[in-house]
Image (cartoon, helix red, strand yellow):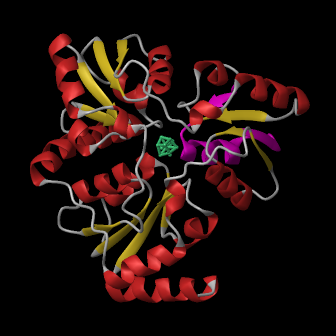
Amino acid sequence: MRSQKIEEKIRELKEKENAIILAHNYQRPEVQLIADYLGDSLDLARRSAKVDCKLIVFAGVKFMAEMAAILNPERTVLMPDLTAGCPLAEQLSAQAVREAKQRHPNAAVVLYVNTLAEAKAEADVCCTSANAAQIVNALDEDEVLFGPDHNLAWYTQRRSNKHVVPLPERGYCYVHRMFQAADIARLKEEYPDAEVLVHPECDPEVQKLAGHICSTSQMMTRAKASHAKRFIIGTEIGMVERLRREFPDKEFIPALETAICEDMKKHTLEKIYLTLRDRKNIVRVPPRIAGRARAAIERMLELSGRAARD
Ligand code: 13P
Ligand code: SF4
């Protein structure tokens, strides 16, 4: 099936089924283009909290689609490929969170949204890369159990006077761990006029070389606001593709061409079409877990929205 044809069929089906497509910034360019809404984890959580449709097709990894399902118990959430998971999220079990809570009875539990739904059910509040420091600083507790990404925990610790305890000790994203400080330093020498934007899942040595440490959507905001004409980008390649498309008069240099999240790339136009046509790949979260996870996600949206208003 030619890609133009598939796009038309997807649009027809979307209308017929009263569906919308939400997609993460790391999706393939053709999937980004068919999406009704494209964003980072926080944008997508906010968006899915106020959709007005019957069906949501979620082109992102499983924890993102689960959040949409948790926030929309009355709607059906479908994933073009149900096997698109996040290996970082797999690194923290609900049992590990319960055990850590016993060791740190006075600590608040702040979990990155890149977690399994059953781990979220154990959290006091969730956070994303866009609001981690804001959320931690809004809490009353002095000690915070923070997981599963230990680089994001390091980033958050530097912006807070709380005691941030990473959980597990060394959880990481394999994609962001590929970035090397030596590569960034070399690119900075080659392009001295470039601004360096990196994701907080990168190693501390990489973060230290950056001008701005941003969630993926914050990279869009920075690229728009900055007077710089050239940027070195330290995150997954899909983000570079979006930046290039939306700011054609600026230059975006990937810090690593091979930084590809295999799971994010599992969704294709063909799979989106088949999912919508057959209403298959329903994302389900057991109600007992969903209720508790929802409280942690909603608290994040509340604290994050409140800080934005203040
Ligand atoms: P963002 O929330 O910044 O889009 O990041 C999500 C993610 O999975 C990063 O690897
Ligand atoms: Fe998970 Fe890393 Fe992929 Fe983001 S880039 S979804 S953290 S594996």
**In the displayed structure, would residue 292 be above or below residue 247?**
above
* Residue extent of the magenta highlight: 210-232
Residue 83 drawn at (x, y percent): 39, 58
Camera-side residue: 214 or 171?
171
**In the displayed structure, would residue 307 be above or below residue 71?**
above
Q: Relative to residue 92, is residue 224 drawn left or right?
A: right
Q: Quadrant of residue 178?
A: top right
**In the displayed structure, would residue 28 be above or below residue 221?**
below
Which residue is rendered at x = 36% and y = 12% of the image? 162
Q: Is residue 227 magenta?
A: yes
Residue 142 drawn at (x, y percent): 28, 11
Which residue is rendered at x = 88% and y = 26% of the image? 189
Considering the image in quadrants, where does the N terminus appear?
A: bottom right
Q: Quadrant of residue 212?
A: top right
Which residue is rendered at x = 57% and y = 65% of the image? 32
Q: Relative to residue 144, is residue 58 drawn left or right?
A: right
> Which residue is farthest right?
190
For residue 213, say whether it is visible: no
Count of marks overlaid on the render:
0
Considering the image in quadrants, where does the C terminus appear?
A: top left
Q: Is residue 217 magenta?
A: yes
For residue 128, say whether it is visible: yes
Q: Relative to residue 76, is residue 161 drawn left or right?
A: right
Which residue is rendered at x = 48% and y = 84% of the image? 11
**In the displayed structure, would residue 79 be above or below residue 292?**
below
Residue 96 drawn at (x, y percent): 23, 25
Residue 108 drawn at (x, y percent): 23, 21
Camera-side residue: 88 or 101?
88
> Which residue is farthest left?
288
